């Protein structure tokens, strides 16, 4: 397929180094000319979930899994994971709160931005499965992290015994500072932590150590986002799914090579390549794997948690999230 006959598609994605070479065109997509929109993830999720404004999009794993579980196949997932993060570090308490004592959150009041936010699914699972906290004993408060008024964008049926109370007048950040919440679970830090005032701190005082121990124990490296295609695009160009995944993977591998290159640092991080090599000792040579097989443990755990918490109305298998062709690969 020559360039003049390439399919023109639009992609919206967050600006990150692992997609940089794809977005700039240094890594082409065979058969596709991409128009790339670099937007903040909250804007991407809102506009794509509500209006489907572009052909290919970064999307919350939680929301996509919920749609698939309810039989909505209007989107087609690719096993491309541009965002992943351990989520112990996203649980915040007041400085006088139960630092390093997650079990003491039992029976408390915990704020979340939305029940279906992927980060909070992992975080609630941590409380339940790692620290024995009964989720039904928690009073859950849903609202905006730093600004009041956020609503649940994809309502789901909650499990029996779960109480979620919307808060429209105050932000979760302010509720925590004012002592009206015992903790908040969020995908990005609240203002009271970012300002370094010391009013809000992380639940775990040494998050990297706790998170590495969790990975060594479980093999779970939490996936936050994936890339999806609109169904009509996939049905018209079924080959596009594989070609896009290949290009995303090449771009990510080039990013990892930059990360590990000690000659002239590509990232403004002291000892960056040394830190990357230390991470290789934990995760292996591919620090950020795409594909189903290397992520099956993580995906199976997440989908089980999402079902337990009512985000997915049925238990979904990892292979159900992606076209069946991704379960097979050609051999040369």
Image: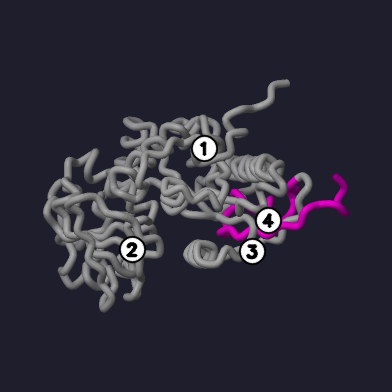
Residue at mark 4 to residue at mark 1: CA–CA distance: 21 Å
Mark 2 crowd level (few <14, some 14–19, many ≥20, 10 Å Cα)? many
Residue at mark 4 to residue at mark 3: CA–CA distance: 9 Å
Asked which secondary structure carries label 2, the reply is: loop
Q: Which residue is mark 4?
A: 23
Q: Earlier in the sequence, mark 4 or mark 2?
A: 4
Asked which secondary structure carries label 4, the reply is: helix
Dot 4 and dot 1 residues touching (CB under 8 Å): no
Q: Earlier in the sequence, mark 4 or mark 1?
A: 4
Report the residue at 11% width, 54% height from top. 107
Report the residue at 55% width, 67% height from top. 51
Q: Is residue 240 magenta?
A: no
Q: Which residue is mark 1?
A: 287
Q: Of the numbered discs in the image, which one, if any, rests on residue 113?
A: 2
Mark 1 crowd level (few <14, some 14–19, many ≥20, 10 Å Cα)? some
Residue occupying the far front of the picture: 71
Image height check: is 220 above or below 171?
A: above
Stretch in magenta: 1-29
Q: Of the numbered discs in the image, which one, if any, rests on residue 37?
A: 3
Name the quarter where the C terminus is drawn.
top right
């Amino acid at each position: 397929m020559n360039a003049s006959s390439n399919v023109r598609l639009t992609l919206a994605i967050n600006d990150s180094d692992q997609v940089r070479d794809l977005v700039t065109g240094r890594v082409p997509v065979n058969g596709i000319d991409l128009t790339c929109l670099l937007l903040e993830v909250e804007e991407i999720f809102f506009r794509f979930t509500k209006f489907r404004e572009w052909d290919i999009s970064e999307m919350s794993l939680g929301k996509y899994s919920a749609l698939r579980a309810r039989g909505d196949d209007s989107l087609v997932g690719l096993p491309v994971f541009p965002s992943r993060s351990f989520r112990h570090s996203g649980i915040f308490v007041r400085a006088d709160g139960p630092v390093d004592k997650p079990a003491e959150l039992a029976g408390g009041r915990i704020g979340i931005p939305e029940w279906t936010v992927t980060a909070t699914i992992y975080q609630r699972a941590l409380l339940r499965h790692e620290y024995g906290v009964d989720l039904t004993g928690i009073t859950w408060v849903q609202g905006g992290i730093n600004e009041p008024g956020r609503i649940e964008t994809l309502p789901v049926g909650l499990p029996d015994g779960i109480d979620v109370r919307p808060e429209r007048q105050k932000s979760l950040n302010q509720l925590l500072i004012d002592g009206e919440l015992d903790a908040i679970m969020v995908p990005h830090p609240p203002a009271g932590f970012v300002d370094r005032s010391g009013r809000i701190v992380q639940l775990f005082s040494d998050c990297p150590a706790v998170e590495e121990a969790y990975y060594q124990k479980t093999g779970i490296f939490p996936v936050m986002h994936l890339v999806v295609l609109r169904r009509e695009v996939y049905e018209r160009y079924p080959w596009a799914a594989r070609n896009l995944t290949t290009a995303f993977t090449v771009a990510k591998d080039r990013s990892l090579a930059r990360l590990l290159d000690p000659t002239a640092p590509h990232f403004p991080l002291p000892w960056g390549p040394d830190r990357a090599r230390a991470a290789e000792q934990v995760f292996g040579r591919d620090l950020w794997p795409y594909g189903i097989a290397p992520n099956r443990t993580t995906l199976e755990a997440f989908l089980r948690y999402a079902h337990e918490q009512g985000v997915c109305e049925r238990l979904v298998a990892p292979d159900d999230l992606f076209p069946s062709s991704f379960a097979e690969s050609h051999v040369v």
